[in-house]
Amino acid sequence: MGISHLQPVLLLLMLRALASLPTQAAARGGHDPSDDGAHGPFSRKLLEDKPQITEEMVRGYMSNTELETAVHAFGSRCSNISRVYSIGKSVNHFPLWVIEISDKPRQRESEPAFKFIGNVHGDEPVGREVLMHLANWLCDNYLKDSLATLIVENMHLHILPTMNPDGFALRWRGNANNIDLNRDFPDQFFPVNNDIDYRQPETRAIMNWVKQEHFTASASLHGGALVANYPWDGTRDTSKHYYGCPDDKTFQHMASVYSRSHYNMSLSKEFEGGITNGAFWYPIYGGMQDWNYIHGGCFELTLEISDTKWPKADELPIIWEHNRMSMLNLLASLIKSGVHGRIFAADTGRPVPGSVMIKGIDSKVSASSTFGDYHRIVAPGETYEVVASMRGFRQKSTRIRLEQEAVSLDFILDPDGADGQTKLLPRSNDRGCRCDNDNAAKPFHVHEAHLWLYLLIVSVLLALYVVFKRKTVPRLLAYRHSSSLRRPVAV
């Protein structure tokens, strides 16, 4: 084989070698080789169960149009403490309306933000009605009730009464495409939902919403049981067993705040204390609460607030009263407990969007880019070492004892480097939580390892090329000499 033929062969070998190198997994937890995204055990498929919802069951519930009217009527009646906005549209183009409640609803503040989401499943509509009751109660009792005033003046509450208006109208669980929206989010263990082309518009709306807002915590309302459910929702081996996330104690505390304040949730005979780890109850994949915690730094609970999925309308006021103090106390706990503060640069005095973690807990919460404020929920009654960090700065830590009251803790970070110059790197998303994400935590080492592998392969191929060339050149010169006797050399 001549040199002119050898070069493309070597190039092909190099390209094949580079193509065979491992790529970084797109989803936290890596790729499950048994699941090809289309035929695996958790592949998305049309739901087959379509429960029959009778006209008698629907009577007394607000239709989508009536709910839309009620949301805008609330915005007009309570305009001093609210704003109404949309985060997107459903498959059938119905707006996903949100009510924000705060004493400064159109301003960014260094306060915690909470979101309530109802009607994730179309055949579980109780959350739609209960959330409108909550909004109206806060409006009616602001400056009259201490708890209502505390919530309105010290946090930003966002209420999405229905995530799935199409499923409600069709009277089935999934959306208009018959997809279960609580199985449609990117999953930490399996890549089934990694293809964004198949992601539902309602799911995309929630994901974009979380990226835009700096949510501290959230809860979605469901029907069919009485229990407060917390992460993780799935397990790495798909088996049913208790699988706690890094903030397991904190989530148990949050769930207990809700359950103990409920009329009878904590008395459950099925769930001890009225709370449960999701994977211990039954594993699901592509769920919203795990995604919020991993990618939004948002501590989310899944609240089952009615034994019946679609109770009769005349039961709704009772269900609201049974859940009212639970919802209010859960909101108030964000203000009255945990660690709150801001992160500043020592050289400029300006806030910086650093991150805060608790030593021994493998998760982070990010400070906002506007005020550098952070809000870290932790279980009370323990001592914690709180660590603040920011790229380009030296990290700082301090130990605190958290009792039943909130702790206010600001950090002033010194610039890294001997010259004292502050070097801030741009952040594409200051709100995302990099919890337990190996790829995000060590990008330099991953790329460095790949670079050395590239160089090693190239070196081996070049060595083979040199050896092969030494053996072929003498024969090639002899061939050229003999052929020159038979024909003139082209110059």
Image (cartoon, helix red, strand yellow):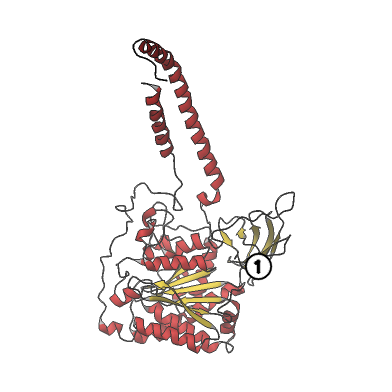
Would you say residue 123 is visible in this rendering? no
* Image x and y of residue 111, in percent: 60, 73
| Residue 445 spot, x, y in % from top left | 55, 43
Q: Residue at x 51, y 67 (%)?
A: 212
Q: What amino acid is found at the position of numbered circle 1 in the picture?
A: Gly
Q: Nearer the viewer, residue 229 or 196?
A: 196
- Drawn side of residue 423 relative to residue 98, left or right: right
Looking at the picture, how far across and down is residue 323, in whole percent?
46, 80
The image position of residue 347, as x and y in percent, is 74, 60
Mark 1 neighbour density, 10 Å: few (under 14) some (14–19) many (20 or more): some
Q: What's the residue at 36%, 9% (across, down)?
A: 485
- Quick one: 416 or 364, which is closer to the camera? 416
Q: Is residue 267 left or right of residue 338?
A: left
Q: Which residue is mark 1?
A: 341
469 up-or-down from 309: above or below: above
Q: Nearer the viewer, residue 366 or 222?
A: 366
Does the rendering let one see residue 108? Answer: yes
Quadrant of image for the N terminus: top left
Corner quadrant of residue 265: bottom left
